Image: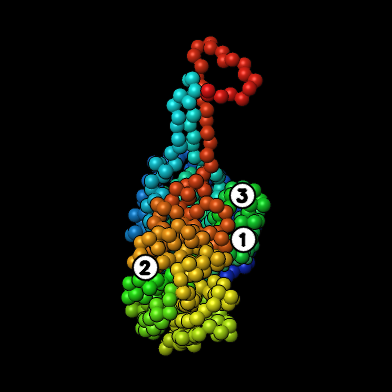
Amino acid sequence: MREIHHLIGGRQVEGQSGRFGDVYNPNTGEVQARVALASAAEMDSAVANARAAFPAWAATNPQRRARVMFEFKRLLEAHIDELAALLSAEHGKVIADSRGDVQRGIDVVEFACGIPHLQKGEYTDAAGPGIDVYSMRQPLGVVAGITPFNFPAMIPCWMAAVAIACGNTFILKPSEKDPSVPMRLAELLLEAGAPEGVLNVVHGDKVAVDAILRHPDIKAVSFVGSSDIAQYVYATGTAHGKRVQAMGGAKNHGIIMPDCNMAQAVKDIVGAAYGSAGERCMALPVAVTVGQKTGDEFVERMLEAARGLKVGLSTDPEAHYGPVVSAAHKAKIEHYIQMGVDEGADLRLDGRGLQLQGAEQGYFIGPSLFDHVRPDMTSYQDEIFGPVLQVVRAETLEEAAALPSNHQYGNGCAIFTSNGRAAREFAAQVNVGMVGVNVPIPVPVSYHTFGGWKRSAFGDTNQHGPEGVRFWTKIKTVTQRWPEGDEIGDQAFIIPTMG
Ligand code: NAD
């Protein structure tokens, strides 16, 4: 059985805890590898390595740090097929979608190549007589990232590429469900010239996470995962004096206006609701139709589109989406489908019970569609994270827009309309962090910033973009004065002013 080790101080290190996690192939339900689950002592060792590497890396000039990122980007591009295949085999995303995951990571590395410019401070010449003021953005020290299963290439890059480019040294604790891609990323960063200890990968579960949250030498933690754990990570990390950003779950709404291009909206939403088996925090699992005629037409067209989807092996180039990540997750999705039925929603398409010939033990689940879902239903309020679209009927835009605004999650949402004024008003008013206008999955490009509101994010600084650079650095402001000759300033007992 293949064993996945930690990567500490530039070397593969076998797990010492005696605990392992099974890594499944979701296409077949077979265990394909086992991954070491770290103890607190193993985390200590990784932090010690990162701490030893920090002074030299922080002192490496930003242009040289950027050169490592340029080379890392080149290597990721050269290895994209290998990475996509590895990702697909552990996550279950189809290959084209897996390439997209890697490409989104590469985009953030490309952003991090601009670090000499991004990390520049500000300068005021002659803020007072002979006095200049300047600021600098310094790295924090040893920092950590804890990532979910659903984007094993993109999300580690969101965190590690920006943090490391800023001069920090990094501990990555990837999801134990699909740990191989994060390991390859770390190996490629070493190959790109990052010194040993700059990026350490420590696999594990709650034990490793708790060791990160309590470690006195870890200065900042970035987390992405489900909301209850995000909230726990935020509360525990900040209680231990760390800077923390913790992104959580989502339930993104798409508003379907009567004046939208219906053919386009259906095409977009079928991909956004069912792509990657719905296992995206920016998926669109709720469609809110405005007006009965719009609702009826949308549901009929969506049913037709969803029935035409091919669910297949993640390696099948014809498949629209593959299996979900685990047997437990499949059972959870099926549980929510039953809950929707029990709560009185109208199940128009039932994806349960799908079996693929020759892959009967795979975690496949067909597309499901509920009509007449109501906001008081638990199956509407909770995140399902599967290939399930819930249609809520509204009569007006106001009524429709209140739904995402009042929902506990506030990651993304979208509006489909040809009315620019309505779209502009919606984007300005909705109580959600990322908005698409005729764009179903509005994941911002790497040089903008990613982050939701409400229970979709704890902490106030987003991922990547200039916000990411702010999260991974602290600002120092210097006020300097160089008196001439023997000049002695006035003794001042009042707060100095530049007046
Ligand atoms: P998860 O919360 O189960 O796991 C995330 C990380 O937390 C993993 O590294 C895991 O090992 C660790 N973890 C699990 N249980 C823990 C515990 N009890 N204590 C401490 N750490 C623990 O999430 P997941 O299932 O891997 O990912 C799916 C979730 O992530 C969904 O809710 C999805 O919406 C969310 N997500 C959010 C964003 C975003 O940017 N908002 C992006 C991607 C995914």
Q: Nearer the viewer, residue 475 or 80?
A: 475
Image location of residue 9, percent across then percent down:
52, 52
SS category of the residue bearing label 3? loop
Which numbered disc covers residue 231?
1
Q: Nearer the viewer, residue 216 or 276?
A: 276
Question: How many residues crowd around disc 2 within 10 Å: few (fewer than 14), some, or many (20 or more)?
Answer: many
Tell me the quadrant of ligand 1.
bottom right
Marks 1, 2: nearer the viewer: 2
Q: Residue at point 42% right, 66% down?
A: 414
Label 2 sits on residue? 417
Q: For the residue marked with disc 1, what is the amino acid?
A: Gln
SS category of the residue bearing label 2? loop
Label 3 sits on residue? 242
Mark 2: C-beta under 8 Å from nearest atom of ligand 1: no
Residue 258 vs 409, above or below: the answer is below
Q: Is residue 196 visible?
A: no
| Displayed quadrant of residue 236 | bottom right
Q: For the residue marked with disc 2, what is the amino acid?
A: Thr
